Amino acid sequence: MPSRITLDYTVKTSKVRFIFFDISLKGELFFIAKFTFGVIVVLSNKIKRFVRMKLQNVTPKTKIRHRNEINSTFSMLPLSARRILFMAIAQLDSKRMLEQGQTFRITAKEYSVIADVDISVAYKQLKEGASELQTSIISIPKSQLLEPFARAGEPLLPKKGKKSPADTIRSLNLTEYCDYAESESSIELSFTRFIEPYICRLKDNYTTQVLLSTVRLSETNASSLYQLIRKNISIGKRSYFDIEVDDLKDELNLFKIEDNEKNYFYPDFKIFNRAFLKKNISLINDVTEIKDLDFSIIEKVARKASKLRFTYSVSKESEAEDDFVDEVLELNQKGEVKASSNNSRRDINAISEPDTEIPEGFRG
């Protein structure tokens, strides 16, 4: 536990409490100072190298984020590859650029606990998943491609050639490499430079998923439906969303292209409901933070269901995510101090923490 020192002090006419925590990380000592009327953090820049989600610290609040353009690719990945990918993404900070050469490590023990599978299954899936992930690609219309981030010291990107046809699809590898160590039952992977814009420095148009929920859904179709629900929650639709049946099947990859024509699976809605919707809705309700998930038909065309409304609630426990670390780094990076003017003049004794005794000499 970090040691704690509490001091009350008067700044101009306002009484302020400083709470200092010292934290030792890999031999480096850092100090965090907290104002009771707000939060200010003083950190060495070196701490950025060490602030990373550790898989042994995963909780029901742990999230992963990725841009919507690659949702379809993620939902089609084999189960083991998808689990490994999401466990790696959980370790990065989606608001910031990856460090050059940054790698992500996952052990069989971590895989077993997070995916809630037997350790023998974890050994097998970790090895299989490493191979599957390395050969997995994302396919994105070239017109929608995001430019890779430029870094000092890295080779310049090739110059753009002549304009491509409008229907050009670019295929990209997800990982630079995936190393599997049999002796340690672990893998280490590195993301490609071209995939980085889809998983980090995210500002908009992204999906947020709960890590434990998405990796514990073993059915691909349930995982795809869960991802769609979280996509809608990410844009503010916290209790319901409406969607055309054909658009729903597009999102869930329930179609095939034959002779340049798209043919949807489950053309009979009754079969679609029985074989797909009911089954996967039940799984999501049982396994994830999404509760009371259900749907209703809100529009019909020629007596056939054409538009659905999905309704649900979200566990408050999973959504009460603590973003303190992100806020800490943002404040440190910008050099800004943000305080609530409404609380800045409150009596220090009135805002004392219940379990904290104020030294006699510092009382107001």
Image (cartoon, rainbow, N blue to C red):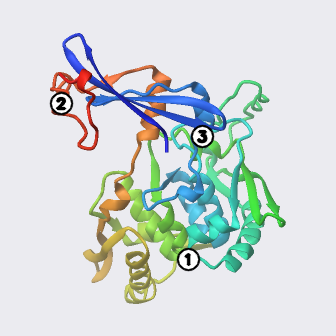
Secondary structure found at label 3: loop
Callout 2, which amino acid? Answer: Asn
Q: Position of residue 243 (x, y in %)?
A: 34, 66
- Quadrant assignment, res 273: bottom left
Callout 1, which amino acid? Answer: Ser
Q: Which residue is mark 2?
A: 349
Q: Which residue is mark 3?
A: 146
Q: Are marks 2 and 3 in contact (CB under 8 Å)?
A: no
Q: Earlier in the sequence, mark 2 or mark 3?
A: 3
Q: Residue at x 63, y 46 (%)?
A: 142
Callout 3, which amino acid? Answer: Leu
Q: Position of residue 83 (x, y in %)?
A: 61, 66
Q: Position of residue 27 (x, y in %)?
A: 66, 34
Gap between marks 2 and 3, in whole Å?
53 Å
**Residue 218 shows which numbered tag?**
1
Describe residue 204's horizontal placement relative to residue 15 as left or right.
Answer: right
The extreme top residue here reads 12
Q: Residues within 10 Å of mark 1 (few under 14, many from 20)?
A: some
Q: Residue at x 59, y 52 (%)?
A: 54
Q: Is residue 259 visible?
A: no
Q: Is residue 95 visible?
A: yes
134 over 245 or under it: above or below = above
Q: Earlier in the sequence, mark 1 or mark 2?
A: 1
